[in-house]
Image (spheres, grey):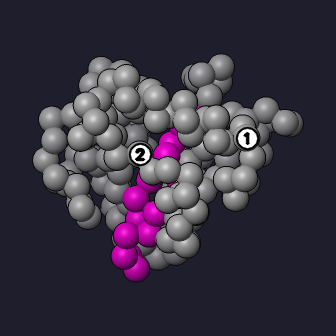
Amino acid sequence: MIIVEDDLGGPEIAALLQERVQGVADTSPPDSIHTLSIDELRSPTITMWSAWAGSELLGCCALKELASDSGEIKSMRTAGAHLGRGVATAVLKIIVDVARQRGYRQLYLETGSEPAFRPAHALYQKAGFVDCSPFADYREDPFSRFMVLTL
């Protein structure tokens, strides 16, 4: 597996991000969906990575700068055929390492609270994330779970 910064120009990443949007839409009401479009992910405050095995896209993730000392994980997704193979752990490690290199003190995330998100919760908890209050522009929402990792 190789993990590279992604310019979001390829059809594979577009399809995976669309799969992510659909997956969230299948489990959360519209007002509780916080996914970013490809154009929003091209913001200069966001760095996107994709994981590959040859020409096959395995997964992706993004790191959004919230402030000079904090960031947020966005658009984390593992391709369905590669679930349970360590892709999410590998891309999460990249995000945490880059956040530390940037001098962030906190790394936040918002994810769903429904049972479909339990594997994500377990991944984040294993990496040291703990529950927290809503951050940035988020609000309390029964369909959202907020977590933070102190770096």
Q: Badge 2: few (under 14), some or many (20 or more) residues near its Cα, within 10 Å?
A: some
Query: Which SS does the magenta portion mostly show?
Result: strand
Expressed as whole percent of the image width and height from the top left, the position of residue 91 reads 59, 46
**Label 1 Cα crowd, 10 Å radius (few <14 / some 14-19 / many 20+):** few
- 45, 119: nearer the viewer: 45
Looking at the image, is mark 1 or mark 2 earlier in the sequence?
Answer: 1
Q: Distance between the residues labelled 1 and 2?
A: 18 Å
- Identify the disc placed on residue 3: none
Locate residue 127: give its quadrant. top left
Residue 141: image location, x then y, percent = 16, 41
Query: Which region of the structure is painted magenta?
Result: 62-78
Mark 1 sits on what residue?
A: 11
Q: Quarter of the image containing the C terminus?
A: bottom left
Instruction: Tell me the element at label 1.
Output: helix
Q: Which residue is drawn at 37% across and 29% down?
A: 25
Determine which residue is flagged by label 2. Answer: 35
Q: Is 47 situated left or right of 141 in this image? A: right
Name the amino acid, label 1. Answer: Pro
Is residue 65 found inside the magenta-colored segment of the image?
yes
Horizontal side of residue 75 vs 70, given as left or right: right
